[in-house]
Amino acid sequence: MHLFCTPSILKCLAFLSLFNVALAASATDWLSRSIYQVLTDRFALTDDAGTPCDTAPQLYCNGTFKGIVNHLEYIQAMGFDAIWISPVVTNLEGNSAGEGDAYHGYWTQDITTINKHFGTSDDLKALSKALHSRGMYLMLDVVINHFASFGLPNDTTISAYGTFNAPDLFHPQCFISDYNNQTNVEQCWLGDTTVALADLNTESQTVIDGWNKWITGMVSEYSLDGLRIDTLKHVRKPFWPAFQQAAGVYAVGEVLINDTSYASDYSNFIDGVLDYPGYYALTQAFSSTSGNMSLLLETSHQTQSLYKNGAFSTAAFLENHDQPRFQSTVHDQSLVKNAMTWSFVTDAIPILYQGQEQGYGGGNVPANREALWLSAYVTSNTLHGHVTSLNSARKAAIAANSSYTSVPMVVSSPSESTILVSKLPMLAFMSNVGAFGSYNAVGGGYQPNEALVETLSCKTLNADGNGNINFASTDGLPMVCEFL
Ligand code: ABC
Ligand code: CA
């Protein structure tokens, strides 16, 4: 059994959240949510057969929308109130030599139909409905930048693309060769000659109108609450505001870059941006007992000053389906727990990639895309408990302070191995001293002698006469403190 305590304010919240659906979900609505990233093909089988799934050949393992519906309780019981699922449209069928098949959903072929491997259009609607009846949100991953082709596409390939079926709706073929040249990044192609990602001419009015009409239709047909936009930086910035408006719901874009000033400018064109620069700083800070904490501090201060709405403009993550899992290189469970804590205690919307709670440790793509059913969805392991406690602490803080999702956090680094996030009533200490290290930290802002709870250990404590807490850890574990 993991330790898990519920601050008193949370006890009436499960009931209230049932009324929290139906209207189009805005950025503000999403700020209090926490997102569980589902890789649809690898999350749950329809029949729970426990079939093996070898990640190496990159083939479909047969996870479905119905499988997700059957395991929503698993996700919600950890405290998540939103899921992000893989792209759902019909993809290239068949196997490419070397890069496998389209189990991840990013090899678009026809945006008017649903990928039959994941289920039917009705199955997707049933998933949306099942989520909403639990007070949860559905975020759909959408690929706007490209369509896919085995080998370079010819006129016949393109004429089969349905909505965008003419060569002049695509940029002339060239693979991206210079990431320092933004025109090259926007107008040349991702992929390679095995699987080419034919780059749409997103300057063309036909393409703009086609996408805007499509997204309006998708949001309405499947009652979507939010979007994760793939390859955001590969489409010119002015394309996005009209697209976001046509969607009418919150959208967070993927800008894969370790550069805060580059990534942050996108927050002027779309609601949210996945915090990749923060990801790089976070993984580095907790990579070992000599990780660079000042880089994390500096990056988070830049995030606060450069994004349109500070860190509220971002969604934070420690893992995703494109990066090696944290535990592929870090094994010290104290470091792991500290690194996991960060996304849940900052101003960002937290995202957890399926399998992290099961301690999965796959390295680079495709090893990091392990099937979750192989874990049997057990709830007994330590990290599962850790995630549950973090979500619970975050929800309690949001419930206790009406400006929790609008007043910026204060981040400081009291020593070279510790970082402190203050977002009253929550005070979170993280450190990279590791399981054999110890640290002391002081934080304040409470009432004199106020009764508090350390939510990860469930221990109660009191602020001192000045409203401070003096915290000593002998095992390097993080601490997340709030009102009892
Ligand atoms: C497959 C294989 C790979 C193989 C590749 C050629 O083909 O799995 O092993 O290398 C999907 C699949 C992938 C598949 C691709 C291509 O399609 O999931 O498995 O790869 O067929 C998104 C999605 C991703 C998805 C796609 C395509 C896009 O999250 O799952 O991939 O729809 C670029 C894009 C980014 C994209 C990513 C895969 O590629 O920008 O949107 N992700 C630099 C560039 C980045 C670039 C990155 C990786 O390299 O700046 O733009 O991402 O190629 C930092 C720097 C960064 C630097 C990183 C590596 O280091 O600051 O700039 O990123 O320090
Ligand atoms: Ca492009």
Image (spheres, grey):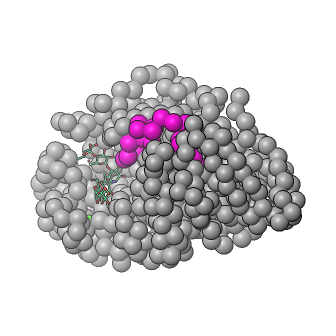
Q: Nearer the viewer, residue 268 or 422?
A: 422
Q: Is residue 191 above or below residue 475?
A: below
How many numbered marks, from 0 up?
Answer: 0
Location of residue 239 in the rendering, given as x and y in whole percent from the top left corner:
35, 74
Quadrant in which residue 130 is drawn: top right
Residue 414 visible in the current orientation? yes
Magenta region's main secondary structure?
Answer: helix
Residue at left offset 35%, top offset 26%: 54
Location of residue 190 in the rendering, given as x and y in whole percent from the top left corner:
23, 56
Q: In this view, does 479 lie above or below 1?
A: below
Left or right of residue 332, residue 20 in this image: right
Left or right of residue 68, residue 40 in this image: left
Residue 333 belongs to magenta span: yes
Residue at left offset 22%, top offset 69%: 180
Q: Nearer the viewer, residue 174 or 152?
A: 174
Left or right of residue 320, residue 92 in this image: left
Looking at the rendering, the stretch of residues picked out in magenta corresponds to 321-344
Location of residue 60 in the rendering, given as x and y in whole percent from the top left corner:
35, 33
Residue 120 visible in the current orientation? no
Q: Nearer the viewer, residue 163 or 451?
A: 451
Q: In which quarter of the image is the N terminus?
A: top right
Quadrant in which residue 363 is drawn: top left
Residue 92 belongs to magenta span: no
Location of residue 242 in the rendering, given as x and y in whole percent from the top left corner:
42, 76
Residue at left offset 50%, top offset 21%: 49
Left or right of residue 164, residue 440 in this image: right
Residue at left offset 64%, top offset 54%: 429
Q: In this view, does 123 lie above or below 138?
A: above
